[in-house]
Amino acid sequence: MISAFTRAALQNPIKKSYEDMRGVPGSRSHRKPYQNSQAFPPRDSLYGDYVTKKSEYTGEYDEKTLYLPGPTEVREDVIEAMAEPMFGHRTDRMTDLYTTIVEDTKEFLDTEQEVIVLTASGTEFWEATTLNLVEDSMLVPTSGAFSERQANVAERLGKDVDRIEYDWGEAVKPDDVHQALESGDYDAVGMVMNETSTGVRNPVEEIGDVLGDYPDTYFVVDAISCLGGDRIVPDEHSIDCIFTSTQKAFAMPPGLAVCTVSEAAYEREVKKDSASWYGGFQRCLDYYDRKGQTHSTPAIPIMLAYRKQMKHMLEEGHEERDRRHRNMAEYTREWAREHFDLYPEEGYESQTVTCVENTRGIDVAETVERVSEEYDMAFSSGYGDISEDSFRIGHMGEHTVESIRTLTDAIEDVVGL
């Protein structure tokens, strides 16, 4: 089931990172590997007929209800919050806004850790946590597209990466992580909590408890597609950094990334000779302590939306929000088992994204298109190589069991179930 984990001793980390991503959506495998050479071919010769042409945005599009693994639906008053008149990012008003969203986020997550909110996608914290915490080597269990990408990012940054490799649909096992830690010396373990490509929810809490016995190894958790919809308290499970993007279970517009930082992680970065500039813990947190602002100009309108939505989240409460997401997940799984099957390993199903195994052999792409055209609802086909073997329903953010049932009814009608 699991291959032996081996150190990726790279002669050319840039080339290796590219080769690892062949066949992964977004990797553009028709392009030649980047060789970091002065003799790099002209751009047109690389892209050929694939060079993107302008396609004018008209604003004349049908509105769709989003059941994607993100972005997801956003409340109307949250969208309206972005329409305030612009103000300066070095004003008292900005201090009020940023300190509000940071401290409200700490309260919602029930954490004593520091919180950074940056204008970026969650990918920023793949890079930043690696640069800030990893000197030489990192352990990354891989069980889907995004955990594989996390390993590729670390390699691209010049780190030695050991993988514990699982088949897609399988979950990471704490005993395997423990075995790897016993036989290796790692600066950090990087892990995807919610593997969006397969609908697997990895047992981060148990693995964090294993990491508690290895205080010199930092634990970094990518919770991009579940934080805010699947309750976890980083302080309780030796998690040094856990991060997300706002367009997922936070149900906010895209454009901001959120990361918690333990005191140990902060101290680790302070002692390093090099670290991330934009996502440096010291730079972000020291500036917050001095000014109550971000060190660089933020996306103020999205932060206004963040403030509004986080108030809604606090009003609902972390535990109640977790319960609502659990109810949605249970309904969707029951529906999937009745009509199809589930792709993830039993007992490790995601609470925010259900990956349905296409046991009926339906045309997934056509079904997704017809549901979009006939019902104005958007859900997702499977990811990458399993695009026709599965499809994915995002039940996160502000959705309810009733709204998810509306989608499954539409799928039943289109498929003829």
Image: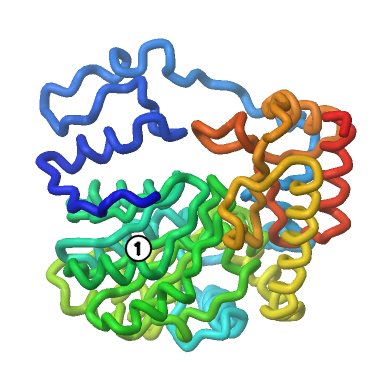
Counting from the top left corner in percent of width and height, residue 203 is at 50, 68
Counting from the top left corner in percent of width and height, residue 193 is at 49, 63
- Most distant residue in the front direction: 1
Question: Is 281 placed left or right of 70 in the picture?
Answer: left
Q: Residue at x 63, y 37 (%)?
A: 390
Q: Which residue is mark 1?
A: 190
Counting from the top left corner in percent of width and height, residue 49 is at 42, 11
- Most distant residue in the bottom direction: 112
* Figure coloring: rainbow
- From this view, report whether residue 115 is shown above or below residue 337: below
Q: Residue at x 44, y 81 (%)?
A: 237
As helix, strand or loop, the secondary structure at mark 1 comes to strand
Between 75 and 300, the one nearer to me in the picture: 75
Q: Quadrant of residue 328?
A: bottom right
Counting from the top left corner in percent of width and height, residue 104 is at 60, 81
- From this view, report whether residue 251 is shown above or below residue 51: below
Task: Specify whether residue 24 is in view.
Answer: yes
The local crowd at label 1, few if under 14, some if 14 to 19, many if 20 or more residues have their Cα within 10 Å, is many
Q: Quadrant of the C terminus?
A: top right
Question: Is 177 placed left or right of 155 in the picture?
Answer: right
Q: Quadrant of residue 65?
A: top right
- From this view, report whether residue 180 is shown above or below residue 38: below
Q: Quadrant of residue 311?
A: bottom right
Task: Specify whether residue 96 is in view.
Answer: no
Question: Is 135 placed left or right of 60 in the picture?
Answer: left
- From this view, report whether residue 224 is shown above or below residue 372: below
Question: Is 233 placed left or right of 50 in the picture?
Answer: right
Between 123 and 140, the one nearer to me in the picture: 140
Mark 1 belongs to which amino acid?
A: Gly
